[in-house]
Amino acid sequence: MWPAPNSNSAKIFNRAMEVLPGGISRLLTWVDPYPIYAKRGEGGYIEDEDGIRRLDLMNNFASLIHGHAHPQIVSAVTQAVANGSCFAFPAEREIQLAELLQDRIASVDKVRFCNSGTEAIMIALKAARARTGRSRIAKIEGAYHGMYDHAEVSLDSRPDNWGNSPASIPHTYGTPKSVLEDTLVLPLNEPIETERLLRSQAESLAAVLIDPVPTKVGMIEMTAEYIDVIQKVARDIGALIIVDEVIAFRLAYEGAQARYGIEPDLTTFAKIIGGGFPVGAICGKDDTMAVFSHENGEPLNPSSGTFTGNPVSMAAGLATMKLLTREAYEGLEMMGERSRKAIRRAFEASRRRGQVTGVGAMFQIHFNDRSLTDFRTAFRTEEENAISKQVHRGLLDRGFILSPRCSGFLSTVNTEQEIDDLEIALTETLQETAV
């Protein structure tokens, strides 16, 4: 049983150390002293290699909106893969999934598929440059948009380097200086400073990249005033607005952009639109998406990929989205609110300091009581990180899986009883924390 040194997970990890750097392929799967290895998933639960069953409230970082191995999605995938997993021809399901997105999202006239959220952001930024003839992009301090160099800037800046007005800080060693120079960093929910920064780059800014509820920034919603400023200034200076709905699409049937009154030029999707399989999409109005078209010669922004639009991902995504009805969204909304209330009660019962943020079927637990408005106010102290690690581990021991940051992304198969059980487990865990 994890984390015993003779557990099956320990044995598998020892093998992994021989072939994978650090023994892992995804950094966020790391849990001290070694990862828990999944054997199977069903509904809301994962069974690990030692036979331990836990409630999965992370759902592969928000990509499984209907839990694990949903029968209708499994059936769709089985039928698709039986006819061939990928072709050098397009297949009809690609068109069907694009039609569904076009039907639901007001800003979507055309769709370009790819294979991940990272790819979707990268291609969307390239499309904005092609459309405007400008090179510079703007993004929110601390916001995660995948692993493209420009999208990673100031992802994890710290008090000792973030500056009074957000500085462009590299995320990885070796980031070219030109990447930092071409990436403008904006403070979340600071409309006056954001307008000043955007107008200072009016002639060179191709796009403003936003997520209405940036999860890495603490799941803090953008204010209506902040969104209004971004939209007004972007229109004034001729920069495109790119809305990252890789995670946020789980917040509303017509997209988070409808929920928050955003009118984007481009939108990126991934995660839930693939039903548990690799997928990404760049969507937008006809004039903006024309940069991808070969109809009048070489596209301004050519894009392709060996597995782009593959029939398995398309089949899984189409089945997933058909199940994600308006009623399903309403249920997710109610379950999300129930979870946040449960977490608040757990803090009250344990008499520990803390709060919860989030919206829809998402939540993040914070181990402080200060006002949270942006990346800097949500930035965790060493003490808060220590408590978070203890709580994450304590919940794992009690059979609940959250992200390493103690955030959760609910699915349509989660039940009220499971949320009530989470409240009990969190209360007990908080009472036992040593910091």
Image: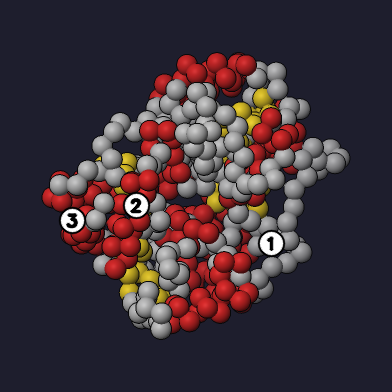
Residue 386 is labelled as 2
* Residue on which disc 1 sits: 307
Identify the mark nearer the N-term, 3 or 2. Answer: 2
Residue at 28 percent of width and 62 percent of height = 394
Q: Please state the horizontal and vertical placement of residue 21, each as a whole percent of the image.
A: 61, 67
The residue type indicated by label 2 comes to Ala
In this rendered view, identify the residue nearer to me: 44 or 23.
Answer: 23
Identify the mark nearer the N-term, 1 or 2. Answer: 1
Question: Tags 1 and 3 in contact by the CB under 8 Å rule?
Answer: no
- Quarter holding residue 1: bottom left
The residue type indicated by label 1 comes to Phe
Residue 294 appears in the picture as rendered: yes
Give SS at disc 2.
helix
The residue type indicated by label 3 comes to Gln
In this rendered view, identify the residue nearer to me: 199 or 103.
Answer: 199
Mark-to-mark CA distance, 3 and 2:
15 Å
Give SS at disc 1.
loop
Mark-to-mark CA distance, 1 and 3:
49 Å
Q: Please state the horizontal and vertical placement of residue 378, each as a whole percent of the image.
A: 38, 37
